[in-house]
Amino acid sequence: MDVHATHINEDMKVATVHAKASLVSKDELNAEYVIPRPFDPKVAPSVAKAAMETGVARQQVDPEEMAKKTRQLSLIDED
C-alpha cells in the first residue's frame, strides 16, 4: 500500500467494505456478480484515507493520485 501503513486497522477494513459495497448497484447484484473487480479505483483511495486519518500511515498520499494509479495498474492487468 502506498501509504506504508504500520498495520491494517478496523477503520481501514470498514473503508474497504464501504468502497466495495458502493461499486455494486442493486440491479447488478446477483449470484454471478457479488464482488466487484479487486482493483477498482475507488477502493485504494478509501483505504489510504482511512489509514491517514487514523495515524497508521507512514506516508501521506493524494487519494485522487491513488485512484489514477490504480486505474493505470488495472489497465495493465487487463492486457
Image (cartoon, rainbow, N blue to C red):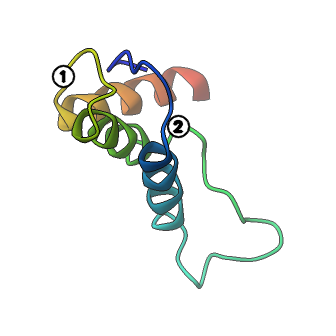
Residue depicted at x 18% and y 22%: 60
Residue depicted at x 34% and y 46%: 46
Q: Is residue 66 visible?
A: yes
- In the image, residue 63 sits, relative to residue 10, either above or below, namely above
Residues under numbered marks 2 and 1 in contact, where contact means CB atoms less than 8 Å apart: no
Q: Nearer the viewer, residue 65 or 13?
A: 13
Identify the amino acid type marked 1. Gln
Which residue matches tag 2?
A: 39
Image location of residue 19, percent across then percent down: 44, 57
Could you say which quadrant of the image residue 67 lies in? Answer: top left
Residue depicted at x 23% and y 16%: 59
Q: Is residue 79 visible?
A: no
Q: Nearer the viewer, mark 2 or mark 1?
A: 1
Q: Which mark is residue 60?
A: 1
Badge 1 local density, few (<14 within 10 Å), some, or many (20+)?
Answer: some
Image location of residue 32, percent across then percent down: 81, 66
Is 41 on the left or on the right of 63, as rendered? right
Q: Nearer the viewer, residue 13 or 63?
A: 13
Quarter of the image for the N terminus: give it. Answer: top left
User: Reading the chain from its start, which is encountered first: label 2 or label 1?
Assistant: 2
